[in-house]
Image (spheres, rainbow, N blue to C red):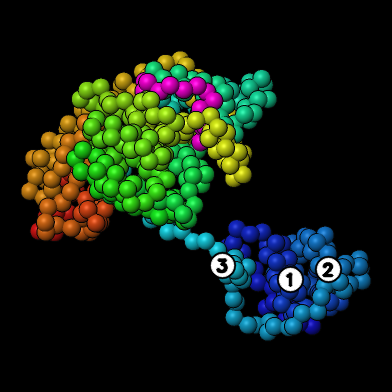
């Protein structure tokens, strides 16, 4: 009789039930050829004694193996490996354990991407966190949103239709969003021009997949939102960087590239460019739209934080102009309410929205119908606009407070321009200080640094004045360590 106490490995501290550990060990022994077809196994009583477990545990393991046709159980006679198992080459029963299955890579080649390394914030509550520019969920009407969500889940009439029409987005949300965008941004549109997505990133991805291939050329700012760059590169398109200065993306350089190559797409963030926070000037906005019409390229306008502007009325989006269908406008409620609320939107010509909806269904049949209904109600009741007014007042105070802190305490180390809006300040380090060295302070975590620009984003919206004080104090410590 084989030494089953060594063939079968059990770990009583594991979360896997003991009977499952026994059955898995026997399956592995059969698969490895250690147990041949027809080979007899110990009785449940004997195996339980050898393994120092309850007999019922072994019985449960045998019942599972029998139900899966690995073994045959003849009551009061014997337990044996099924004769229908193919004969496999035997392995040593005491060989070193080698992980198989998902421990190995796929046997054929596949496309590979280089995603941006993200900061694991959840595991770093002990650190002072300077984020990328997130809303303060302590101000956000999340409680009202979730209360409405729960109300809808309890309504039988809503539950029957909650997931109907979520491929493009529930009609109620598209209606409310269209009204909101018309009133706040001056867009000329209807519900047929709106696609609800799981955030701006999905909108960028869907548009890129339909517009680009390996013969396409895309223009982006330098620096730029790295995940957008990655989406464009993964289509096989050639991504060309154009400089960004205090007036936004260089439209003269855009024009020069248009004369050299057939440009399919330009990705811009005109309101508050990511990551530098600069605003595209009126002159350049007009020229960019004229170039789009002249050379026939599409503009993806990412307007992720339009609602936060502090010094004057914000510039209207490019999408509000008579752009002749050249602009795809995208935004997200993640930057308004909470990063975990994965609801974004795309506004584009009707036929393109229809194709995006069809393509989206290949990978994702639709969104959370309950959440979309709840968000629509939040907009309809005016709660979203009331919250935005409150948030703008609060974030302006925090921006100005941080502005003074940076000037008073870090003026010898950094330089920056105060943005007219948004939720972050783009901070550049003076030579000889290096941005990566800031991370030598073990009490500090910075979500978005740019080694090439020797800069980082200081998100202020999510931090109270006391928290801003603490964050700047940690930066002071870091710079003193570097001096």
- Residue 310, quarter of the rendered image: top left
Q: Residue at x 79, y 73 (%)?
A: 46
Q: Which residue is mark 3?
A: 109
Residue 356's spot in the image, x, y percent?
A: 55, 38
Q: Is residue 58 left or right of residue 377?
A: right
Please tell me the numbered disc located at residue 89: none
How far apart marks 3 and 1 lie (CA) works out to 33 Å
Query: Which callout, 1 or 2, points at the residue further toward the start of the chain?
Result: 1
- Examine the structure image and report whether residue 188 is included in the region drawn in magenta: yes
- Examine the structure image and report whether residue 199 is included in the region drawn in magenta: no
Q: Residue at x 28, y 26 (%)?
A: 315
The magenta region covers: 184-197
Q: Is residue 321 visible?
A: yes
The residue lying toward the viewer, choosing from 283 and 76, is 283
Residue 293 sits above or below residue 79 on the image? above
Q: Secondary structure at mark 1?
A: helix
Q: Is residue 124 visible?
A: no
Q: Which residue is mark 1?
A: 26
How far apart marks 1 and 2 lie (CA) works out to 10 Å
Mark 2: few/some/many CA within 10 Å (<14, 14-19, 20+): many
Instruction: Quarter of the image for the C terminus: give it.
Output: bottom left
Residue 36's spot in the image, x, y percent?
A: 81, 79
């Amino acid at each position: 009789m084989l030494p089953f106490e060594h063939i079968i490995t059990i770990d009583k501290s594991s979360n896997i039930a003991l009977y499952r550990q026994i059955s898995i060990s026997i399956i592995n022994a059969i698969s490895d050829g250690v147990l041949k077809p027809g080979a007899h196994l110990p009785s449940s009583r004997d195996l339980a004694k050898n393994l120092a477990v309850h007999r019922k545990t072994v019985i449960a393991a045998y019942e599972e193996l029998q139900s899966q046709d690995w073994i045959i159980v003849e009551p009061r006679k014997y337990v044996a490996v099924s004769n229908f198992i193919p004969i496999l080459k035997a392995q040593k029963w005491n060989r070193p354990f080698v992980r198989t299955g998902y421990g190995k890579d796929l046997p054929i080649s596949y496309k590979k991407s280089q995603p941006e390394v993200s900061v694991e914030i959840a595991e770093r509550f002990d650190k002072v966190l300077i984020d990328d520019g997130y809303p303060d969920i302590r101000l956000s009407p999340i409680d009202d949103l979730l209360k409405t969500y729960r109300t809808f889940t309890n309504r039988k009439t809503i539950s029957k239709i909650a997931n109907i029409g979520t491929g493009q987005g529930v009609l109620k949300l598209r209606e409310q969003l269209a009204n909101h965008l018309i009133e706040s941004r001056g867009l000329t549109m209807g519900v047929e021009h709106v696609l609800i997505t799981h955030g701006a990133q999905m909108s960028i991805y869907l548009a890129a997949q339909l517009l680009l291939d390996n013969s396409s050329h895309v223009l982006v700012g330098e620096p730029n939102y790295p995940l957008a760059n990655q989406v464009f590169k993964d289509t096989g398109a050639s991504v060309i960087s154009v400089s960004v200065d205090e007036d936004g993306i260089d439209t003269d350089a855009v024009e020069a590239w248009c004369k050299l190559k057939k440009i399919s797409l330009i990705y811009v963030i005109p309101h508050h460019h990511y990551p530098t926070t600069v605003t595209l000037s009126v002159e350049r906005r007009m020229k960019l739209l004229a170039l789009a019409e002249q050379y026939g390229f599409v503009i993806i306008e990412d307007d992720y934080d339009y609602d936060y502007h502090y010094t004057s009325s914000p510039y209207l989006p490019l999408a509000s102009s008579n752009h002749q269908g050249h602009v795809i406008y995208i935004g997200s409620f993640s930057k308004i309410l909470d990063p975990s609320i994965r609801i974004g939107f795309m506004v584009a010509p009707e036929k393109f929205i229809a194709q995006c909806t069809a393509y989206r269904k290949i990978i994702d049949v639709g969104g959370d119908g309950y959440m979309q209904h709840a968000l629509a109600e939040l907009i309809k009741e005016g709660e979203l606009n009331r919250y935005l007014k409150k948030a703008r007042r609060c974030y302006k105070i925090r921006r100005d407070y941080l502005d003074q802190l940076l000037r008073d305490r870090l003026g010898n180390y950094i330089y920056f321009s105060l943005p007219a809006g948004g939720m972050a300040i783009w901070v550049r380090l003076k030579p000889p200080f290096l941005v990566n060295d800031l991370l030598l302070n073990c009490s500090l975590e910075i979500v978005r640094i740019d080694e090439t620009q020797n800069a980082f984003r200081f998100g202020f919206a999510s931090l109270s004045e006391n928290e801003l004080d603490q964050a700047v104090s940690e930066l002071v410590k870091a710079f003193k360590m570097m001096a």
